[in-house]
Image (cartoon, grey):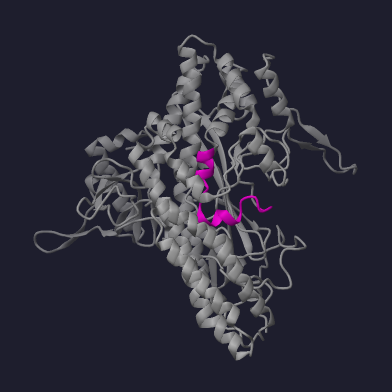
Amino acid sequence: MTAADLDDYTWINDSAKADKVAKALLKWGLDAGASSFCHWFQPMASTFRHGMTGQVQLSTLEFNDDGTPTFELKGKHILFGETDGSSYPNGGMRATHTAGGYLCIDPASPPFMRDDNIFIPACFVSYDGKALDEKTPLHRAHQAMSKETARLFKHCGFEVKGAVNNIGLEQELFFVPREAYQRRMDLQFTGRTVMGKMPARGQELCDHYMSPINIEAEVYGCMKEIQEQCYKLGIPLKTRHREVAPNQYEFAPLFGSVIVQTDQNLMVMQICEEVARKHGLAALLQEKPFAGVNGSGKHNNWSISTLCGTQLLNPGDLTAKSGNPNLFPIVMAALVAGVEEYGDLMRLAIASPGNDFRLGAMEAPPSVISTYLGPQLTAYLKDFSEGNVYEYKPATSPINLGVDIMPIVHAPAEDRNRTSPFPYGGHRFEFRAVGSSQNVSLVNTVLNALTAKKFAEISEGVEAGKDAVAVAQEMLKKHFKVIYNGNGYDPAWPAEADKLGITHIDSGVEAIDKFVAEKNVKMFEDLKVFDAAECAARRTILLDLYVGTIEMEVGCMIDMINQHAIPSAKAAGIDAAGMSAGVVKLEAALKEMHAAADEYEAAKLARVLRLDTMIDVRKVVDDVEAICPADKWTLATYKELLFVDVGKFA
């Protein structure tokens, strides 16, 4: 077999070729000391699962009839597996008496080796074919996007076999001293602090962002080892730097296929947690570990290219290779229409529990789903929509530094708008509102699905006798309102967006409920991404994740007040009555949440509990911490947690 054979995914249907692949994997593994393998899959709603994946590691050691040992790995072993489908979040699609779950190899994502195990990326489905994982719907949506790209481009005179979605993920996270982390139940159980007084220094001077990483401190060695481990797995983790908040950092890889990049990001997060431990640190991947400083995101840079390498979002490349200057505005019209019509699904895709603290908080884009295109492209598409059709040629702007020996800087057509949830940055869009803890499969499932849907609508118009340009022009006229080039942090923008009818959903709980909106279910069913039962199940799973997260956070808060804050206050002679009353309020709210009629009502109550009741109680506790002598306060403080490069405080 050759590399070309593996690039042709039909090898999975040829048992002889599958046996050859298995034999090669076995030899590769044994030569490197790996004698086990597993199917590596992505259960739904795995925020608190280490590595966010599932696996059962199986030894390749077998015994011959005479008792002598041998190693065996056959094609059937790598192609398929079976496991319990009922013990993972499944939204009612599986039960203990109907528990079948089936694994099959994902040939689009390469196997990799770590320690003594070969990992085989896999999809996970139920006995009746329902997707029980995050990967299968992503494949379905990606396939739909590829097919609809080929269909549309053929109508526009450009024959292609399909398309691929490429992404690049900017992974933000915090590193904190492990000794302090181990004195915080909330960080260990939930990934965020539910109480804690801000120290005298935070991020007021913007002195952390992209400043040097202290080469003598723990984080530098930790980040180097993370990169080294990633390189060994073929993960091109190119960038490392400090982020805005104290103790906040970022890694970013090279662009790559959405299937592979999603898999690799899950392994990056796992490696971060494991390597941090070796260096006396804890890696925090949750969106908002600390109040008072920025939280973490995972910017999802997103583009599409044909299988022959033509970049759909690069106007010069697309025009040159297709010979059709109208194809770029047709593509952009479809994307603008998709963002406007399915903005609720985009908001749903980023409705991780931690994002409720970030969106619109001057550290992440608002919960209004709009797109920034920049003045040049916006003006061009306006002309296009009104019938003035010509080729888009973005102009750069020369910047003279005023120093003779310095080169001229050429600014692109678009500025960088960090307040937009989905800005166009020249050749790519950047979904900036994605949460740092998320598996980005659902995010990219939605983006690929809405793209496929709008490409299909233009094709249907052409097949009904219309001109593709005319269909795209009508799309732009109808959906142009979703283009917003202003300041997304402007307090007046959400109200303005409401008047325009642009998606604006502050509550992650309400966003999750959009999974079962009629138009969304229809789109997913039309594209064969989800059926109605799968949509309903995922709504349930995401709501249960939200409720469960808050339940754990409240439990931690109650225990920490009772076991630490109140005893500390009493030891210092400080009145603890306010904190005791706070515990009563928390317990009552938790009881009300547990008594809710269904998961949606419970989630709505959980959100109020988290964003109102817990914050009120936290203020009482933080005020006590502020006046409690340091030697009496038994919880690790923000000043101990947030300044790992500075040293220990007395």
Span colored in magenta: 344-363
| Above-or-below relation of 612 to 106 | below
Q: Is residue 41 left or right of residue 342?
A: left
Q: Farthest residue toward the top?
A: 465
| Above-or-below relation of 89 to 505 | below
Does residue 224 appear anywhere in the picture?
Answer: yes
Give residue 250's position: percent from left, percent from top: 61, 56
| Above-or-below relation of 577 to 535 | below
The residue lying toward the viewer, choosing from 72 and 494, is 494
Residue shown at 50% from the left, 39% from the top: 345
How many discs mark residues in the rendered view? 0
Give residue 646's position: percent from left, percent from top: 69, 74
**Magenta residue check for 359:** yes
**Magenta residue check for 586:** no
The residue lying toward the viewer, choosing from 344 and 138, is 344
Does residue 110 appear anywhere in the picture?
Answer: no
Q: Is residue 504 left or right of residue 116?
A: right
Quarter of the image that includes the C terminus: bottom right
Give residue 593's position: percent from left, percent from top: 44, 61
The residue lying toward the viewer, choosing from 101 and 413, is 101
Give residue 326's position: percent from left, percent from top: 61, 17
Quarter of the image that includes the N terminus: top left
